[in-house]
Amino acid sequence: MNWKRLAEKRLQELSTQFPAVAVIGARQVGKTTLAREAFPSAAYKDLESPLLRQRFAEDPTHELKQLGDLTILDEAQTVPEVFSALRGAIDERRGDRLCHFCVLGSAQPALIRGVSESLAGRIGLLELDPLTPAETGLSTATHWLAGGFPDALRGDFRTWWEPYLSTVLQRDLAVYGFRPDALFLRRLLTMLAAQQGGLLNLSALGNSLGVNYHAVQHGIDLLEGVFLIRRLPPFFRNIRKRLVKTQRVYLRDTGLLHHLLNIATSQDLDNHPLRGASWEGFAIEDIIRRERIVHPFTQFFFWRTATGQEADLILDRGNRRIAIEIKANSATNVHDARKLEATLDDIGADAGWLVGIGGESTSLTARVGSVSLDLQPNWLP
């Protein structure tokens, strides 16, 4: 079962503007399928193949010269030598205005480092996220429980997630040049799951895990680098209010979150004390995944003052800001809408939305509306 990806159009647009494009995202999120569907006539080279990896590592310039008009280079970050060679290969072919290389990678820091050092201005970058209900047509409840990875949606998501974690934490990070302590990263990830959406306190996490602040910081960087967590920064404006200045941290996929929290069914989820935090993380990710396709340069924040005024997600599109508060029930409470409206001027937002489950989509105040994400999976403000 293959699903049409919203990002395909954006990838094709980038390929008309750049001589190379890069698609980054978590392992098994669907990068290869997307690239092959977007570029059906392209040749394909999997650099995780031992023989190919050796050949490209020994003489990447020679190997790139043997390629045709358009080639997909999968898992490129496993051969860092490719990036410097790509610069020359791109410049040699640049005059014909065609896209010649589609580079795929599953480790954000390694791939971004290669791009920033060798390919600045030569490559268009797309981050591919897990699937959303808007792409699959499956229910929001199904996605909320199982997450958005294609194979997790095709079977028992918990059976799928356990070997996936082992592969990423034990094998992939080592291949990418790190020396991970897989047991420590698993414990850190489980602790973050229990604090889903909480403020990131590195010292407190270190005390709980029996390590120092720097070890936690490094672990967080690794988990973010393989797309398992998201750090959401606070939004600042020059106003006379005490603001929370610490990042929030979320497990990006609720299938992983629920696996680590031992949530196997929708009934388990409904009865779990972290149900609200789980829905908040799910809604934030779902909106971000689709927002980045329609508005690729949007920046994402949260807002919270010391007195408790807050917005769970701020979309900063440059020309306008939108504040969103997420509710794990029907989001039609006028009192909640008025509280959100009171923050809009401080944020510099021209509109606010309450995003919940069930209930009608309606206008609650002059500047705040209500929407049910499960009933409107394509909704964006």
Image: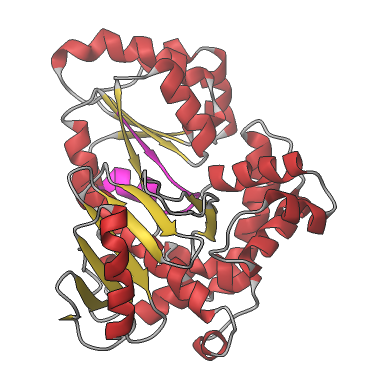
- Mark count: 0
Q: Is residue 68 above or below residue 195?
A: above
Where's the C terminus, which quadrant?
bottom left
Residue in the picture at 57% in, 66% down: 196
- Asked whether the viewer can see residue 2, the reply is no
- Asked whether the viewer can see residue 23, the reply is yes
| Image spot of residue 76 (x, y percent) | 47, 31
Is residue 33 magenta-colored? yes
Residue in the picture at 38% in, 47% down: 31
Where's the N terminus, which quadrant?
bottom left
Is residue 79 magenta-colored? no
- Please state if 100 lies on the left or on the right of 29 as rendered: left
Q: Is residue 171 above or below residue 334?
A: above
Which quadrant would residue 222 be assigned to in this image? Answer: top right
| Image spot of residue 189 (x, y percent) | 66, 58
- Please state if 125 lies on the left or on the right of 194 as rendered: left
Q: Is residue 269 above or below residue 198?
A: below
Span of residues in magenta? 21-37
Along the line of sight, which residue is nearer the eye, 244 or 151? Answer: 244
| Image spot of residue 271 (x, y percent) | 57, 90
Residue in the picture at 49% in, 25% down: 113
Along the line of sight, which residue is nearer the eye, 20 or 181? Answer: 181
- Please state if 77 lies on the left or on the right of 259 as rendered: left
Along the line of sight, which residue is nearer the eye, 334 or 256? Answer: 334
Residue in the picture at 61% in, 72% down: 259
